[in-house]
Amino acid sequence: MGVTLPALPSVLAIDAGNSKTDVALIGPDGSVLRTGQAGGFQPSRTGVPAAVDVLAEALAAAGIGDGGTGDGGGGGRPLAAHVSACLANADFPAEERELAREIERRNWGRVTAVHNDTFALLRAGLPTGAEPRGVAVVCGAGINCVGMAPGGRTARFPAIGRISGDWGGGGGLAEEALWWASRAEDGRGGATELARALPAHFGHDSVLSLVEALHLGRIPAGRRHELVPVLFAVAAAGDPVAQALVERQADEIVAMAAVALGRLDLLAEEVPVLLGGSVAAARHPRLTDRVVSGLADRAPHARVAVVTAPPVLGAGLLGLDALGAPPGAHGKLRAHFG
């Protein structure tokens, strides 16, 4: 049962990634009234209604809404004037429309706007009052990139895996590290310290034992992301195979950012390139330094920055933008999230 609120809040901000979902209910002055969190958002695996149920779980965790499929706040009353939902796996306009329809059906807001979650990172990294000009690259569980230019122009990629030309992200790096480790152990490939370090992380004495445990579910698939910090540690210690994987990830980030800047005719302008997601935000020197040097060659006016603010801040700012909220509201929201 949802709580009764004295006045309709301005924005219900939602940031839903592959591994977790965050929501924030925001007042007209930018104050954060409620927050909640739930699990990952994966409509391509679970279907749209079940995926949006995860958003409802986050609302319930925040103590707002009915947590189900009916009235947002009870009695036909929505939760907020504007729902700003930045969602992973919303990679095509058709997916955005389908997700928006399902959210609208639940009556959470008078107006609903659905964006890919990478737009939340981009908006969170742009200062209040700045023009919508820049590029954001998320490198977390997966990898994606979006860009915006004045006048509403955008650049983006499908980012649905290898079939759309993607490489990397935490999931991709973990798989590559296991591939090289397996081949090193059984003789199909060259030596690499990954063959010792990856199984050791899970208390196994061989890559074969680790692969068997992953295959049979004795180690949950969701724990594969734990291998990514191991990969970076092995690279930092000088292992050539691990170093090559980290460098390839950096080159992928550079390629996406440079192409997006080119599509928006921003290569000749000083413009931010914002990095976020668990892999990029960890500030691994080998990765970050190669991104900076790569962009210096391909987009010399780009200014690289790492965004550590939670992406739900970006979703909230997009909602305040849509409502024409005053700058003070944006500032108060930013202050809440540090």
Image (cartoon, grey):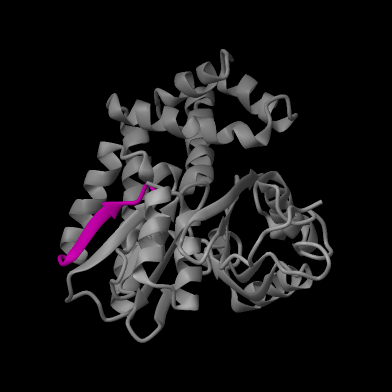
Q: Which of the 4 image quadrants contains residue 299?
A: bottom left
Q: What percent of the width, then of the height, locates residue 285?
A: 25, 38
Q: Which of the 4 image quadrants contains residue 234?
A: top left
- Is 302 magenta? The answer is yes
Q: What percent of the width, then of the height, locates residue 160?
A: 57, 62
Q: Which residue is found at the position 33% from the left and 31% from the top?
A: 235
Can I make out residue 143 in this image?
no
Q: What percent of the width, then of the height, locates residue 7?
A: 63, 65
Query: Along the line of sight, which residue is nearer the eye, 107 or 183?
Result: 107
As drawn, the residue found furthest toward the front would be 6
From this view, report whether residue 283 is shown above or below residue 72.
above
As drawn, the residue found furthest toward the bottom would be 151
Can I make out residue 166 in this image?
yes
Q: Would residue 186 appear left or right of 274 to someone viewing this image?
A: right
Q: Which stretch did the figure color magenta?
A: 300-309
Q: Which residue is found at the position 45% from the left and 49% from the top?
A: 310
Query: Along the line of sight, which residue is nearer the eye, 163 or 100?
Result: 100
From this view, report whether residue 337 is shown above or below residue 200.
below
How many numbered markers are drawn? 0
Q: What percent of the width, then of the height, locates residue 38?
A: 66, 45
- Is 196 magenta? The answer is no
From this view, report whether residue 97 is shown above or below residue 178.
below
Q: Which residue is found at the position 44% from the left and 26% from the top?
A: 194
Q: Would residue 73 appear left or right of 281 to someone viewing this image?
A: right
Q: Which residue is found at the position 30% from the left and 71% from the top?
A: 129
Query: Along the line of sight, which residue is nearer the eye, 156 or 330?
Result: 330
